[in-house]
């Protein structure tokens, strides 16, 4: 298939980095002052005889060097140094040397990370082709037949005003947006699951855990995405190199930040978003407005970095909203969109000439990027461009010319490719594509007349060449995810507001039921205390956990889309990490309340009560997470949760005796998880170790004329509660296990990345 013409960037080399185009060498400094200086008499201070301006009688101009040789002048040597413009020239030279040093550092660091030979991840180079892409949303066309190619060694920049379809096009190319029509291929194969580990998509909106520092984010990504064969120290060293490369090493120990916690700046978050994708040296990089929120210098360095990645075998596609002039000069190829249409595609440096041929001349002092955007927004410009044919707008795939093939000249594949040479004739070079068993990618290094140019042929990857395995083992992923989950959960568990809430509830509960007596009239009070504990430690963990997955949804989807880890490793690590921390607060609560209210002064009953309470907390947390996984809308999830808890509470056996519930509804009590929690806790609060004195008018048969003792079993029988704590605990434990399994499968299907189309 013929390919689209493209710009010919320079071959990969550390020498290819140069200062920005706008950094012009300053004009030479003005010559040293040769104006004659007045000579004065050392005694009187009066000018010596001569001209009116005080020049010597000889009439010869006196230079600064001559002045320095004669102490008769009124100037001292240090004053003359300050007047000399030479230090300004030195500062300017230092300034440009610093810029060159910074840019050379980018090239040198990339050479260390990925090698200077242009070998990308696993040797893959991706040729991306998209044909006639059309997308409709709710009947509105977003993309209207977009065509194009992106080749290794190039930066394809997509420009257009807001709403022109830039992000939608990137989503389509990454396989995250369903197409209404059209076809996308990578190396002439349909997009498939195994390719996602070779593709990095830098989203416009960053998704991180705000409580983690920049360094922790980079180290975590390095630990799970770089192979197990690389030592941990080497992984962290690479992360440090990337942070230094992007200029975020100075804020490495600052938290990323959330809506409620101040963290790094927006520009630093944007660069961190790019950094996590560069760790693995992907073959195809898609960047959605990576320069938004960055100053012009930082934006230039970032795009320069992506261009150097391209020079080393990467295929780079980026959307840019409003590039500066130096930034625009870094683009190889340009695709301009307007209202979902292509108005230009081709050499980025040829866009101004193309617009002039169409009839729109760019002023000399105007930024070409701004000029293109203004045309794309203007009604007259859009009408003119849409009246042109697809070929005139570049929205077709043309045959590659010899002058546009230098970008791939360095990318040889010794294992599968071969090299042949052609000698150029006097009238230029004639190139023919030789096809073997497979269609080949090729490049031509153009030389002067009579020199030899090379064509490098590469066999395309077979279907089985794409490695679909994870970079790390299940245990490595589990360990890294466990450490991250502990870090995130600790920030919630030890949140000051949550600690204050539980402390206040514990104190108020202890005061209201403080040292409850052992009389028959206080049995109901004890039931109220047990039921309150059961309800509170059902509501609290459920409402906390119902927001778990919606808050982590963006992170989970992004990391699963790029094939970072197995969902089972994520889920198991999260369960194991959060379990001890979510047991901490109910443990402290029950230690205070149990002994302050004197529920049962038997130590064995206390430990049994504590274990059963933890099982109840685990069940409540699991139910909240199941609802969270099933419903991503937090408002609807809270409605579902409220209905579930209130219904379970009414059927729990406290407000209404189960025997008094209508028969056709009574069976629902066995679905009430609060019934089992309340029943299990009640068996420990009312056991053989506690007894109550009878009231004058007792409802218990063991009491005769107010005499006798009521033990715990009598109380349970009176309330129709079975004294089977082991059964209650087994039911709660089994229910927890079932809910956790259901949560995993719900996550698997509800949080599954979109399949390529």
Image (cartoon, rainbow, N blue to C red):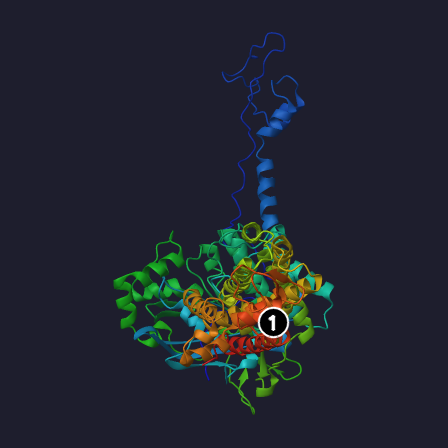
The extreme bottom residue here reads: 437
Q: From this view, report whether residue 255 is shown above or below residue 43.
A: below
In the rendered image, is residue 353 in sight?
Answer: yes
Mark 1, Cα crowd under 10 Å, few <14 / some 14-19 / many 20+, is some
Q: Residue at x 42, y 78 (%)?
A: 665
Closer to the camera in the image, 208 or 329: 208
Residue 62 image point, x, y percent: 59, 25
Q: Would you say 642 lies left or right of 306 here?
A: left
Residue 301 image point, x, y percent: 55, 56
Residue at which label 1 appears: 570
Residue 109 image point, x, y percent: 65, 60
Split into 4 quadrants, where in the image is the C terminus? bottom left
Q: From this view, report whether residue 61 is shown above or below residue 658.
A: above
In the rendered image, is residue 559 in sight?
Answer: no
Residue 458 image point, x, y percent: 59, 82
Q: Would you say 396 lies left or right of 724 here?
A: left
């Amino acid at each position: 298939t013929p390919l689209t013409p493209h710009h010919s960037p320079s071959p990969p080399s550390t020498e290819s980095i140069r200062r920005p185009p706008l950094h012009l060498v300053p004009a030479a400094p003005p010559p040293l002052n040769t104006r004659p200086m007045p000579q004065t008499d050392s005694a009187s201070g009066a000018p010596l005889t001569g001209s009116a301006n005080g020049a010597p009688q000889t009439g010869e101009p006196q230079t600064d060097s001559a002045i320095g040789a004669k102490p008769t002048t009124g100037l001292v040597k240090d004053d003359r140094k300050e007047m000399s413009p030479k230090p300004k020239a030195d500062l300017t030279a230092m300034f440009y040397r610093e810029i060159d040093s910074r840019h050379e550092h980018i090239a040198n660091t990339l050479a260390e990370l990925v090698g200077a030979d242009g070998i990308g991840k696993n040797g893959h180079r991706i040729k991306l082709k998209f044909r006639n892409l059309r997308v409709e949303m709710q009947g509105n066309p977003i993309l209207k037949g977009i065509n194009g190619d992106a080749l290794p060694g190039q930066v394809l920049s997509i420009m257009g005003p807001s709403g022109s379809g830039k992000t939608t096009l990137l989503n389509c190319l990454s396989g995250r947006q369903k197409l209404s029509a059209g076809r996308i291929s990578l190396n002439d194969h349909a997009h498939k699951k195994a390719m996602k580990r070779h593709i990095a998509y830098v989203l416009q909106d960053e998704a991180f855990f705000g409580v983690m520092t920049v360094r922790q984010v980079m180290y975590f990504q390095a630990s799970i995405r770089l192979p197990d064969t690389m030592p941990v120290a080497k992984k962290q060293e690479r992360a440090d190199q990337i942070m230094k490369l992007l200029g975020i090493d100075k804020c490495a120990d600052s938290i990323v930040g959330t809506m409620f916690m101040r963290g790094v700046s927006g520009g630093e978050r944007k660069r961190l978003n790019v950094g996590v994708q560069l760790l693995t040296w992907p073959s195809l990089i898609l960047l959605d407005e990576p320069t938004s929120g960055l100053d012009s210098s930082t934006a230039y360095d970032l795009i320069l970095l992506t261009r150097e990645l391209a020079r080393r075998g990467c295929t780079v596609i980026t959307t840019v909203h409003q590039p500066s002039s130096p930034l625009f000069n870094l683009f190889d190829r340009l695709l301009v969109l307007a209202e979902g249409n292509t108005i230009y595609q081709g050499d980025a440096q040829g866009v101004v000439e193309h617009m002039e041929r169409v009839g729109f001349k760019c002023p000399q002092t105007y930024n070409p990027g701004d000029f293109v955007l203004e045309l794309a927004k203007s009604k007259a410009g859009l009408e003119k461009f849409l009246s042109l044919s697809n070929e005139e707008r570049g929205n077709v795939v043309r045959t590659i010319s010899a002058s546009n093939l230098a970008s791939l000249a360095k990318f040889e594949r010794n294992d599968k490719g071969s090299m042949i040479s052609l000698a150029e004739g006097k009238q230029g070079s004639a190139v023919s594509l030789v096809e073997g068993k497979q269609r080949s990618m090729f490049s031509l290094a153009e030389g002067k007349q009579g020199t030899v140019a090379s064509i490098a042929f590469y066999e395309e990857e077979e279907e089985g060449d794409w490695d679909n395995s994870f970079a790390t083992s299940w245990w490595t992923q589990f360990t890294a995810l466990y450490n991250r989950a502990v870090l995130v959960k600790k920030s919630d568990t030890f949140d000051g507001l949550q600690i204050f809430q539980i402390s206040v509830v514990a104190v108020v509960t202890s005061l209201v039921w403080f040292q409850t007596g052992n009389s028959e009239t206080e049995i109901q009070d004890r039931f109220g205390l047990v039921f309150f504990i059961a309800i509170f430690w059902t509501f609290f963990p459920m409402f906390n956990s119902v927001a778990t997955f919606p808050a982590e949804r963006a992170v989970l989807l992004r990391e699963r889309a790029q094939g970072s880890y197995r969902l089972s490793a994520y889920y198991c690590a999260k369960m194991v990490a959060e379990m001890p921390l979510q047991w901490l607060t109910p443990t402290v609560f029950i230690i205070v309340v149990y002994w302050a209210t004197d529920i049962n002064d038997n130590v064995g009953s206390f430990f049994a009560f504590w274990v059963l309470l933890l099982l109840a907390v685990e069940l409540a947390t699991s139910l909240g997470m199941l609802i969270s996984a099933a419903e991503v809308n937090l408002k609807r999830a809270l409605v579902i949760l409220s209905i579930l808890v209130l219904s379970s509470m009414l059927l729990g056996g406290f407000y209404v005796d189960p025997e008094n519930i209508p028969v056709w509804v009574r069976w629902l009590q066995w679905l009430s998880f609060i019934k089992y929690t309340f029943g299990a806790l009640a068996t420990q609060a009312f056991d053989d170790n506690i007894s109550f004195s009878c009231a004058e008018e007792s409802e218990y048969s063991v009491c005769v004329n107010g005499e006798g003792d009521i033990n715990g079993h009598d109380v349970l029988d009176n309330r129709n509660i079975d004294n089977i704590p082991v059964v209650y605990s087994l039911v709660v434990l089994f229910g927890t296990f079932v809910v956790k399994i259901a949560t995993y499968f719900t996550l698997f299907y509800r949080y599954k990345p979109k399949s390529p189309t």
